[in-house]
């Protein structure tokens, strides 16, 4: 059993490192990670096989949901929802904001500023 208070600044130094991913916990496909990205850095399009919660600790990120442009299926078997419109494809998440989305949705992440965020996958 883990009992420990963690200082985020001690885990990640955004001034010295490029992208950094620290696995804090993992259990049966669920993950708890701290991710650090430099301004303009991008995490390429991918899907999560679990529901996702993102909490921005520092900076600002943009989540991009774009099934037509990001789909990598030859015959589009990725189960992307058809009802996402142009307005709903990009979301800016700022410091101390929480963003939730469901599993199996193609997305990418772009850092709009040097950023640190908590990724919870359950």
Image (cartoon, helix red, strand yellow):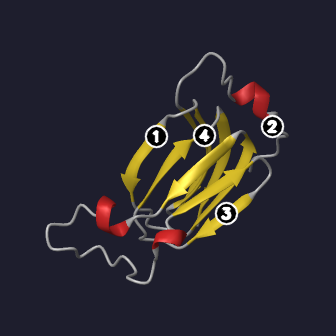
Q: Nearer the viewer, mark 2 or mark 3?
A: 3
Foreground residue, 92 or 22?
A: 92
When the figure is inspected, residue 23 is found, relative to residue 104, above or below; the finding is: above
Q: Are marks 4 and 2 in contact (CB under 8 Å)?
A: no
**Do labels 2 and 3 touch, CB within 8 Å?**
no
Residue 89 is situated, as x and y percent measured from the top left of the image, at 49, 66
Q: Is residue 17 left or right of residue 104?
A: right
Instruction: Tell me the number on the disc at residue 42.
Output: 1
Q: Is residue 8 above or below residue 61?
A: above
| Camera sees residue 92 | yes
**Pointer 3 residue:** 99
The residue carrying pointer 1 sits among few (fewer than 14), some (14 to 19) or many (20 or more) residues within 10 Å by Cα, namely some
Counting residues from the N terminus, which is met first, the one under dot 1 or under dot 3?
1
Estimate the x, y position of residue 18 in percent, counting from the top left: 53, 24
Q: Residues within 10 Å of mark 4 (few under 14, many from 20)?
A: some
53 and 43: which is toward the camera:
43
Q: What is the secondary structure assignment of the residue under circle 3?
A: strand
Res. 25 in view: no
- Quick one: SS at disc 4? loop
Q: Nearer the viewer, mark 4 or mark 2?
A: 4
Please report the residue visible at 43 percent of the width from the left and 67 percent of the height from the top. Answer: 49
């Amino acid at each position: 059993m883990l009992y420990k208070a963690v200082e985020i600044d001690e885990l990640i130094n955004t001034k010295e490192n490029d992208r950094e991913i620290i696995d804090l916990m993992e259990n049966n496909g669920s993950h708890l990670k701290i991710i650090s990205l430099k301004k303009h850095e991008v995490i390429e399009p991918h899907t999560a096989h679990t529901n996702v919660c993102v909490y921005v600790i520092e900076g600002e990120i943009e989540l991009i949901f774009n099934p037509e442009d990001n789909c990598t299926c030859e015959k589009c078997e990725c189960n992307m929802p058809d009802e996402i419109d142009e307005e709903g494809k990009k979301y800016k998440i700022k410091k101390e904001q929480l963003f939730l989305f469901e599993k199996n949705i193609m997305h990418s992440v772009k850092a709009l500023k040097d950023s640190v965020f908590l990724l919870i996958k359950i």
